[in-house]
Amino acid sequence: MFYIISLLTGLIFGIGMALSGMIDPAVVIAFLDVAGEWNPALMFVMGGALLVFIPGYQLLIKKRQQPFIAAKWSLNSLKALDRPLIIGAALFGLGWGILGVCPGPAVTSMLAGNSDVWLFMVAMIAGLFISQKLKQKIN
């Protein structure tokens, strides 16, 4: 059941990103360009998502002792803002701002036939691999 629900929610999420224009790097870059020719269109995407999420969370999730399809909640136990988190977030933001592509929309764009995103996906997977190797060396 977990895999079926994951597939359905992933499909809904991907269709929503494609319909909203989030798979178009030009739209994302225009949204991030607050000092230039800013396009606030993606604020409406976020607002629409929050209009659905907030009541759903309050009514269906917040009061539950455990998730619908799992034995326990999958929450991160780390609460501190440590150096790896800050550096990783900065690198993620830098890459997102330069290219206008985020991992979720990149997968959707790739599946929609955008071959330009393949290099990004290869670089992202390489970055994940390299960061894991660096973490192993540090620890």
Image (cartoon, rainbow, N blue to C red):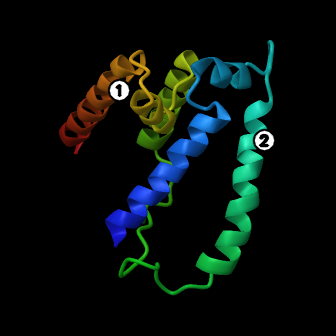
| Disc 1 crowd, CA 10 A, few/some/many (<14, 14-19, 20+) | some
Q: Nearer the viewer, residue 3 or 98?
A: 3
The mark tally for this picture is: 2
What residue would you read off at disc 1? Answer: 121
Q: Where residue 72 appears, x then y in whole percent?
A: 39, 79
Q: Say which amino acid is labelled 2.
A: Phe
Q: Say which amino acid is labelled 1.
A: Met
- Chain-order first, disc 1 or disc 2: 2
Q: In which quarter of the image is residue 6?
A: bottom left
Please name the residue shown 29% across and 31% down the image: 125
| Disc 2 crowd, CA 10 A, few/some/many (<14, 14-19, 20+) | few
**Left or right: 124 as drawn, with respect to 103:** left
Q: Which mark is residue 44?
A: 2
Q: Where residue 131 appears, x then y in whole percent?
A: 29, 34
Quadrant assignment for the N terminus:
bottom left
The kind of secondary structure element at disc 1 is: helix
Label 1 with label 2: CB-CB less than 8 Å? no
Please name the residue shown 72% across and 42% down the image: 45
Please name the residue shown 77% across and 38% down the image: 43
Q: Where residue 69 appears, x then y in whole percent?
A: 40, 77
Quadrant assignment for the C terminus:
top left
Q: Quadrant of residue 25?
A: top right
